[in-house]
């Protein structure tokens, strides 16, 4: 009998798990946790987009062998709970690198040239005839870009900054990457030096206990008053209160944010009222093609896991687990 898989979100027919029995969620709204519990009592595989995988869920899924996350991040995995039950977890790196890098550059350009703010001004009929200077922004080309987190996406951003905008690129990373320095002419830097010298500070680290609030009051205080902060990683990597204060007191010039500590972001969040902050609804990988490619990759890895085939893209902390109980 073919293994049973549950797909916890609507997906195109091409993505539906082959070589498996499967059921999928087709509701207009995202599946609730209680609804998910009812569907996974005999599932061996689970395809998700960020639902929390913890002891509570796993208690409802005694047959589960593998969970495949349609995301590069996997902070929704309770790794210890999954290890206890020998449940493999996979993610979808690589396929979204270029798309997220595009968005990072879009945020840089939008914040630097005040695109959303000035778009609203024109549409509100407030252009007026007071001259252009109040509408001035800052240049991106030729400036210094500091990238915190030089993974695959960081490299793609560095490439765009260096060869597309002739930027000097500094980077801070857990380990130095000599090959990247050679091929992209980037410079390895301490975090303090990067914050002091960069015109644009871009955060692109995974969310872990070590990176929680990596950017806080002390870090923002080191930045230039003319600097622009961009976050395309995870909202919890930034102390949001410290960011708000840095913007209010003009310690930094502006920010571009695709992520927030609380998502969806509260309508009362002060960041939403600041004209010098560009805000997006966590859409880093959100293009039709990239999301399709991510879903296809996640489905293929899930099928491999539950059918006993060789598996790639197992998250590092869960490598080596037996896929079969």
Image (cartoon, rainbow, N blue to C red):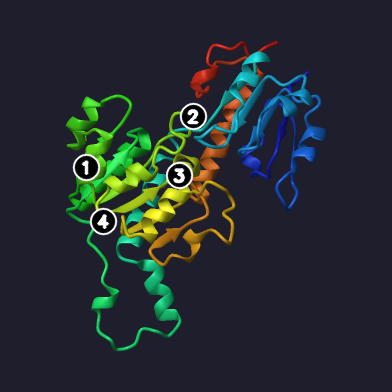
Of the residues under marks 1 and 4, which one precedes in the sequence? 1
Of the residues under marks 3 and 1, which one precedes in the sequence? 1
Which of the image's four quarters has the N terminus? top right
Residue at point 77%, 29% (across, down): 40
Residue at point 34%, 87% (across, down): 128
Tag 1, which secondary structure?
Answer: strand
Give the label, 1 or 2, closer to the camera: 2
Residue identifier under label 1: 169
Residue identifier under label 2: 209
Of the residues under marks 1 and 2, which one precedes in the sequence? 1
Q: Position of residue 12 (x, y in %)?
A: 64, 45
Work out whether 200 lies above or below 40.
below
Query: Which label sits on residue 239?
Result: 3
Residue identifier under label 4: 225
Cα–Cα span, label 1 and label 4: 19 Å
Which of the image's four quarters has the C terminus? top right
């Amino acid at each position: 009998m073919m293994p049973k898989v549950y797909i916890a979100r609507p997906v195109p027919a091409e993505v539906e798990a082959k070589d498996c029995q499967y059921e999928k969620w087709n509701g207009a709204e995202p599946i609730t946790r209680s609804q998910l519990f009812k569907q996974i009592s005999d599932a061996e595989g689970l395809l998700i987009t960020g639902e929390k995988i913890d002891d509570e869920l796993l208690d409802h899924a005694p047959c589960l062998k593998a969970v495949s996350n349609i995301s590069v991040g996997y902070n929704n995995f309770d790794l210890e709970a999954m290890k206890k039950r020998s449940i493999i977890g996979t993610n979808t790196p690589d396929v979204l690198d270029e798309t997220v890098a595009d968005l990072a550059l879009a945020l840089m350009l939008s914040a630097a040239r005040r695109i959303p703010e000035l778009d609203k001004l024109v549409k509100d009929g407030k252009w007026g005839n007071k001259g252009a200077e109040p509408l001035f922004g800052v240049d991106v080309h030729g400036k210094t870009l500091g990238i915190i987190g030089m993974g695959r996406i960081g490299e793609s951003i560095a490439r765009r900054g260096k060869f597309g905008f002739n930027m000097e690129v500094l980077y801070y990373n857990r380990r130095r990457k000599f090959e990247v320095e050679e091929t992209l002419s980037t410079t390895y830097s301490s975090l303090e030096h990067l914050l002091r010298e960069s015109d644009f500070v871009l955060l692109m680290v995974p969310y872990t206990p070590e990176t929680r609030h990596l950017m806080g009051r002390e870090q923002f205080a080191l930045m230039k008053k003319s600097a622009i902060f961009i976050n395309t990683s995870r909202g919890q990597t930034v102390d949001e209160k410290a960011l708000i204060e840095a913007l209010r007191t003009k310690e930094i010039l502006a920010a571009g944010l695709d992520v927030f500590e609380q998502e969806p972001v509260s309508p009362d969040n002060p960041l939403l009222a600041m004209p010098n902050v560009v805000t997006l609804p966590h859409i880093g990988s959100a293009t039709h093609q990239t999301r399709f490619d991510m879903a296809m990759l996640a489905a293929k890895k899930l099928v491999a896991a539950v059918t006993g085939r060789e598996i790639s893209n197992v998250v590092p902390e869960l490598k080596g687990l037996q896929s079969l109980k």
